[in-house]
Amino acid sequence: MTKLAVCHSPKLVVTKRVPKPPTRHDPDGEYAFRYRAKKHASLPHVVKFSGGRSSGLLLFTLLENGLLDAARGDVIIFNNTSAEHPETYRFVRHCMQAARIYGIPFFQIEFQTYEDARKGEWSRLPTYRLVNDLPKSPENPDGFHWQGEVYEELLSWSGYVPNQFERICTQKLKLEVTRSFLQDWLSSKPSIPRLGHYGDHSRIDAETAFRRHRKNRGGVPREIFVQKRAYAWNRSHFRPEQRFDAYCPNWKPFENAVLADRTFGGKATFGKGGVEYVAMIGLRADEPQRIARVAERGASDAGFEGEHIYMPLGDMAVSRGDVNAFWARQNWDLALPSDASLSNCVFCFLKGAANLAAVRAHMKQERATEADGFGPLANTPCDLAWWDRIETSYGRDLLAERRKTRGNVSHIGFFGSDGVSYRAMSEGLDLADYSETMLPCDCTE
């Protein structure tokens, strides 16, 4: 196996003094990193690793400069949407291997639902699970999903597709999953508990679920409602107990005094008197809109109480060119275009017209190929046909729902109702015509 090593990571000068802002590099090539509050230095640090080059540079900059400490409760997290390119998963695995020598726990986690009773009725509830760094298979049942299973489970559970105004994919597959994980992680326990009933099959009753839908003023006809929920209902109805050391060989128990007496029911609590942590996010200086969105979220604190966000690459004035130059010096890299068009969910509707056109052209050549260690890419998120099926299955069919159509629009999907759809893209739609309305992604995690 090729030895993975990291060289020439940017050097940080760390100080706990406040409130001077970070400064651009000095003549010696050093960058000053300052905590905004003295107490932040003692809080657990959470590195939100996206699986891309920028977050990889941030990760190894923090590791190489000793900014992370396992004894403090620091942890690295990759949220798997199951819709990434196989090369992204390969890159994540290489980063996990290279990071292991630094002793900081690194986990892959996924969204999942499970069954439990609420007010006497069985329903599906959201949670997460730990997965290892190899694809799921009969021989590796604890591996990560990569054929869109997690993404489809979310859409089946919710009953609709996300769009630019309601990004449930980012919200549910990343932000809320991370918070759920941290409730367990920051309670300083060695494992996460089993969730769900002990029956050998699903206990969801379609009629009861539909009555609940109508009681909550839902207007979807029964046949469509049941059809959309079927995938989620047929997924595993429980999450087993999972030990951290089974998914991270260098996991060790930790005790941080700042976390003491901040748990309830075996979970860390957020909010007044709850746990706090530092979140490290790999946004660059040439992504000002995304940085502003994250900063705004941190200022509002709504739903993210206790999270203190830091974006060191932005403070260090790091650009995409700097990131690519860093990875050019390593003996491994993300084997995808340096323009990042294939990063994150392969055909994500938020990539913008230009990126989606580039992705379509690139993946047209790969559609029938087989990714080494994975399998055929056809009918996976690397294939427009998969996105077409998902949009058709979980988008809104106004005619089938017996609702009024909007002009000539009868189906509302990922792109709204402006004529763009994954089927149209697969049939050769000229995306340049929509360049002004399909703005590039500004997701933040």
Image (spheres, rainbow, N blue to C red):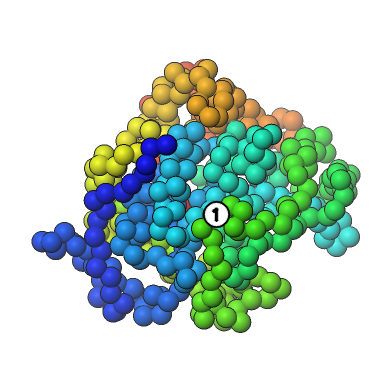
Examine the rendering and report whether any part of residue 101 can be seen.
yes
**Crowdedness near tag 1: few (<14), some (14–19) or many (≥20) residues, C-alpha within 10 Å:** many
Image quadrant for the N terminus?
top left
The three-letter amino acid code for the residue at tag 1 is Cys
Nearer to us in this view, 126 or 290: 126
Q: Is residue 316 left or right of residue 36?
A: left
Q: Residue furthest left?
A: 27
* Residue 420 position within the rendered picture, expressed as x and y whole percent measured from the top left: 51, 29
Q: Residue at x 71, y 61 (%)?
A: 193
Q: Residue tagged by mark 1?
A: 248
Residue 53 shown left or right of residue 266 in the figure: left
The quadrant holding residue 81 is top right
Where disc 1 sits, the SS reads loop
- 277 or 287: nearer the viewer: 277
At x 61%, y 42%, the residue is 143
What percent of the width, then of the height, locates residue 113?
71, 50
Query: Of 407 and 355, which appears nearest the observer?
Result: 355
Where 43 falls versus 51 (above or below)? Answer: below
- Which residue occupies 39% across, 40% down? 440
- Position of residue 195 relative to residue 329, above or below, is below
- Establish if 147 lies above or below 293: above
Residue 248: % across, % down: 55, 54
| Residue at figure coordinates x 68%, y 76% from the top left | 264
Asked if residue 424 can be seen in this view, the reply is no
Closer to the camera in the image, 150 or 47: 47
Q: Is residue 430 left or right of residue 107?
A: left
